[in-house]
Structures are given as structure tokens and as C-alpha cells.
Amino acid sequence: MVPAPGGRERRGAGSRAPLQWETLPGAALRLIIAEKPSMGRALAEALGLPGRGRSLIEGNGLVVTWCVGHLVEALNPEGYDPAWKAWRWDRLPIFPEPFRYAPIEQTREQFEVVARLLNREDITEVVNATDAGREGELIFDLVYRLAGCAKPVQRFWTSSLTPEAIREAYGAMKPGEAYAGLRDAARSRQEADWLVGINATRAQTLRMRRAGAEDGVWSVGRVQTPTLALLVRRELEIRDFKPQPFWTLRARFGHPDGEYEGRWFKEHEGETRERFATEAEARDLAARLAGKPGRIRSVTGRTEKKKPELLYDLTALQKEANKRFGLTAEATLGLAQNLYEKQLISYPRTNSRHLTEADALKAPQWIKALAQGQLADLQPFLDALRKRWPVKLDKRFVNDKEVEDHAALVPTEKPARGLAGDELRLYDLIARRFLGAYFPDRVEAKTTILTEVEGELFKTSGTVVKDEGWSAVDPPHRRRKAEKAADPAEGEAQEGPGEEEGDEGAEGGLPVVKKGEAVAVVSLHPKEGKTTPPKRMSEGDLLAAMQGAGRELDDEALRGAMRDCGLGTPATRANMIETLIKRAYIERKRNVLLPTEKGIRLIQGLPAEALRSAELTGSWEARLERMRRGEETRAAFMADIRGFVSGVVAELQDAPAPQLHGSPCPTCGQPMRIIPSTRRGEFFHRCLACNVLAPVVKAP
């Protein structure tokens, strides 16, 4: 190693002591600021700095320090003007100009360390090494500006914390101004959230107080309120749903090669009818067909090939971990962050499901690390891949145009050892998804038999897996039958409106039949069913809805094409869900998210549709993304936000007060007010005339 300019070599006692570096007085130093202590120490180690340090590490012409997440926060309104402390209509809207900030009290000591280093005379250049994304950029920018620093900045940008990746990124740094768009987007997002949150929350709270509400603050936010609206709308659809009974007719047929079952259907004017409105209709047809001979009208077979799943981005990983393991979005993000800081996976807060051409060149090292790591179950697949090597990932996985800040989540070149519990399960998910991309398509043979009895048709479908392909490595999640039979009140196992549970094609072998062959009608049995409401949202369902800005898309490729839109970002959605829970707007019940009565009342009583609009907020996120790319100006965006806030405040002030009446008072008959309990999700009914307090009512 060559000492940096301004440094000199110093050895400890004995010729074999490790090299250390002592900075000479007056030498020019470079300050590196990481986002967290663990990341700062990883940087220092990779760059050859000795020691660990409590708040900084110095040597080799470098000083490495770190934040602990955010060190700086925006001032509250009263920090600008004491008159803004009072919640009054004539104080709204509040538009501070310019925005002002202060150190967070709990981490003030570390802020002062970083600020002193930024202003040290011997430090001539600063490296922004916070997380390579919008929030990391904001963390650095707020500290840098509050410290009054004007020294030149270099931006360190990496998707991995392995020593090799750190050194490579350190040698390819760009001037901080190359990321001016990202910085503008970060500041604009923070200021927009402050303006909407402060003004709309005060206006809605004043409006609720005007109606007699006694339950404190009614928080409203740019992202949180549209997210809550998604859950409330679904809950109201479920409550308003009226189940409709129907009947189907199933027949069991006998063939020399075995029995099989079919379901009655009829084509009429281009539509397929599979149900009867009354039981009598189903039983009448069953009686007419009983004992009659049947024949095979047609047999069709086709082969379907299913390509490997796209690699994980953060949202896809959170959804899968929620579905398979019941992990919350916040827990998954925390586990992924731990794996990243352990140098085992790439940067987790990514919105891409693709790799770049440069990433693909490193992929053999990642495969080698899997072979050397603790995932013994993957060895047969790694052996099979080794026999076919070299294998290149196709453009479905490798596409530079689909990667902006960070590529998809993948394992790194560091072998995993000593992982356990949820960390191991999450690492296994990421490893299998990556490895599966190298395997061939899953091949399924699908057979459809149409059986005719007295002119009536019955349909039978079967699927046989001919080649598991990638799904042997990365098996799709299948819900157990016990889960499907769970209590519908919990939101489990409820299918879409009008769907009948258990109405799926048979998976497995069917008898080999030929067109025109005779079959016997063994039995005919009408089956009663009823339409079911939409299912309640799991955390994975809500993440998908947030990602699509309220547009429920089933196609993963379409969802990827819309990644510029959405409620929040992959990095912030988990926190938003937890915020709604803390503010008693929603609650987590098993694996389902339910809006509380307070959350429902907020959405139902909020006259400003724009505050509930997922599409509008999604378009704002798209504008922030365009700002990052230099296609949108910060001034134009913030001007529109101020105009929006002014309109919302005026609308809330002019709107009539919402009715908060509950059931009649048992003593005097007057309408009672709905008053939240101190326990989350529970409410009292209080009579304001005679002060009678009704028993606690639990939110459904």
C-alpha cells in the first residue's frame, strides 16, 4: 500500500507489526461520511484504515465517520414563528421560506462530531458515502448544509459492501453535483411531506373539533392517507357485499382407464355459463341426465412453458416473505439491511428486477459463493449448473435500460456462513430466485376433456408437470388446504367476488381417452355455493397496491413498467404501514391489515378527494423520479405542492363538519358521540346531554 500525500509510514515495535498511517500536521485530508457505523467501519476496513473507533476512524490521509440514520430534522411550525404554535384557521396555510432544520436531540453528539469534521481546516474534500438512494442523499445533504460546509463533495455509490465492491466504487466516484437531481428530489419529497402533513393535519383536526370530536390529532399525509384509503375502500366493499347463492352441477364419469370428474357449462352468446340460479334447475338437469350414456366430444392437449420469475426488488421480496413466512414489510427490510451490512446481498432498497451487463460478468463469483456457503440444499442444482456451464443470463434478466440506481437483489461473492432463523430464510429466497434464472423453463402438459351427455357439456382440466425446470430450484409458494379453510372473517381464503372456493382444475393424471369414446355417468351431484366478497389485504397485497398507485395489476412485467409511480418508494412503504398502525388508523390481525373505525371515519369524512387519491400521489412520485433524472424542476414541483396545499386547506375549512353521532343514548335518547378509547381499535359512545358512557364497542 502506498501512503497518501501528506502521510508517512509508521511501524509498531518489531519488524512484523502491521503498517499504520500517521497524518502529518497541515496535510490535506479527505472526509468520508457513511450512513451508519457498521457501513463506515466496512468502508474503513476495505480502504486499509486501522482500528474501529467510537465515532470516527482516521489514517492513510482519510477520516471516516458516520451518521446514525437521520441526524437532522425539520423544525416544527413554532420553530419559525411562535404564533404558528396555535392550531387556528387564520394561521393556515403554513409556508416556511426557507425551510429550517436542527439536530435531532437524541443524536446531537454524533451530529456535532460530523459537523466539526466537516469544518476542520485540514479536511479539504468530503465524500458522501451514505446509502446510494434518495433517503441517503437527504441524510447527507441536511447535515452538510446545517454544518455550513461548502467544501467539494465526491459521491460514493455502491450496491454492495464487499471489500472488492467498495474499492471499485471508491475508484469510480463522481462529483456530488452529478447527483443534483437526486438531491433536489430528496429535498422536495421531504418538504412536500412536511407541507401536506402539517397543513392538512391541522385543517382536518380543526374540522373534526368543530364537529365535537374529542380524540386529539387527525393526522393526514401525502402518502399515508391514500394508503389508508386503499384499505378502507376494500373494507367497505366487504361490509357492503351481499352474498348470492348459486349451484353447480358436477358429474363423475367412468372410463376403462379410470374415473374422472367434470363440471357442467354452456356457451351462450359468447359467454360461458357454469352456474344455476336455483337448486331446482341444477337438480332437474341432474335428474334428466341420470343413467344416460356419455361420450368424449373432444380431447385437447397443449404444452405450456413458464419462464423463471424475475429477480427480486425490495417490494417483491417483502410480498413473498409476507406470503411465505408472515413477515411484515418492516421486518423484511430490516433483515435485508442486516444481510447487506454483512456483505451477503446487494443493496436492498432497489426498485429494479434486472441486472446490468457489468453485473452479469460478476455473476459467476456469486454462484461460486453459493457453492461455498451454507445452503447445502442448493448443491445438487449447482452441480447440475456446473455441468452445463457456461450459461449466460438472457435479456429478460440483463438489461441496462431497466436499471437506474441499483440492480436487482442478488447474493454477493461472499459465502454465507452462520446464518440462522429469518435471516437464513430470506437469504435462501434471494439465492434461489437468482439461481433459478439459470435454469430452463418449467414445462406443463395441460389436458382438457369435453364430455357430452344428452347434448349437455361437462369440462375437465388436468395438469401434469413434465419438467420442473427452474421451479425445482425456486419452488412457487402453495397455500396449504388448512390455510384455505381458515376463518373468512380474518380475511383468509376469500377469493374474488363471485368465485367458488375449491373450483380449480385437477392437477395430476387423467385417464387416457379418445374423441368419440363412450363413458358411463357414474354420478351427478349438484353443489351449492355462494359468491364471496373481495379478500382483505395482507401486507403483501397492500404493498402491491401501493406499488401500482392503486391500480391492481396481476402482471409483474406491467408492474415493473410502472415503477416510476406508486405510493411512496420501496424504502418507505414499510415505514408507512407501521406509521398507520401507530396512529391507530389500521391494525394488524394475523396476516391481514384492517382499518380501525377511526381510520374509516377519517376517509369517509374527508371531503378533499385529492388527499385520498392514490393515483395523484403516484403521479407526484413519478415527478420526483423525473426530477432525479433532470427532467423536472424542483421549483415547478414545489410551486404545485403549495398550490395543492392552499386548495386543500380552503376545501377543508369550507366543508360542513362531519357527523360523529353514534347510537341513541339509553337514558335520554339523544344521539351519542363516538369517542375512541385509550386502547387501540376500541370506542365509547358518550352522551353529551347527560354524560352517559356506553360500554366499549370493538371495531370490527
Image (spheres, rainbow, N blue to C red):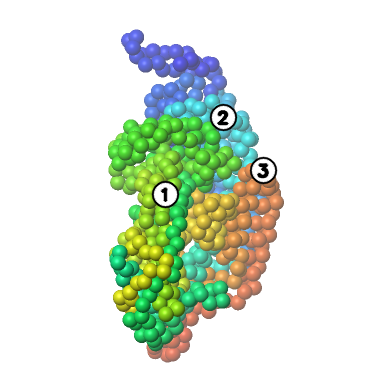
Instruction: Specify which label sits upstream in the sequence, 1 or 2.
Output: 2
Residue type at tag 3: Gly
**In the image, what residue occupies the spot 38% across and 33% down?**
386
User: In screen coordinates, is 138 left or right of 341?
Assistant: right
Alpha carbon distance from label 1 to label 2: 42 Å
Instruction: Please say if the residues under marks 2 and 3 sit with CB atoms less than 8 Å apart.
Output: no
Sequence-wise, the earlier of marks 3 and 1 is: 1
Q: Which residue is mark 1?
A: 442
Near-viewer residue (248 or 585): 248
- Alpha-carbon span between mark 3 and mark 1: 42 Å
Q: Residues within 10 Å of mark 3 (few under 14, many from 20)?
A: some
Amino acid marked by disc 2: Met
The residue at which mark 2 appears reads as 173
Q: Is residue 503 visible?
A: no
What crowding class fits label 2: few (fewer than 14 Cα within 10 Å), some (14-19), or many (20 or more)? some
Q: Residue at x 63, y 35 (%)?
A: 178
Asked if the residue under mark 1 is in contact with the one under mark 3, i.e. CB atoms within 8 Å, the reply is no
Q: Which residue is mark 3?
A: 630
Check the image and name the residue furthest to the top: 15
Tag 1: amino acid: Arg
Give the x, y percent position of residue 224. Answer: 52, 60
Which quarter of the rendering shows the C terminus?
A: bottom left
Q: Nearer the viewer, residue 476 or 80?
A: 476
Please report whichever mark, 2 or 3, sits nearer to the chain's N-terminal start.
2
Q: Residue at x 54, y 41 (%)?
A: 395
| Residue at position x 51%, y 42% in the image | 397
Position of 61 relative to 640 (above/below): above
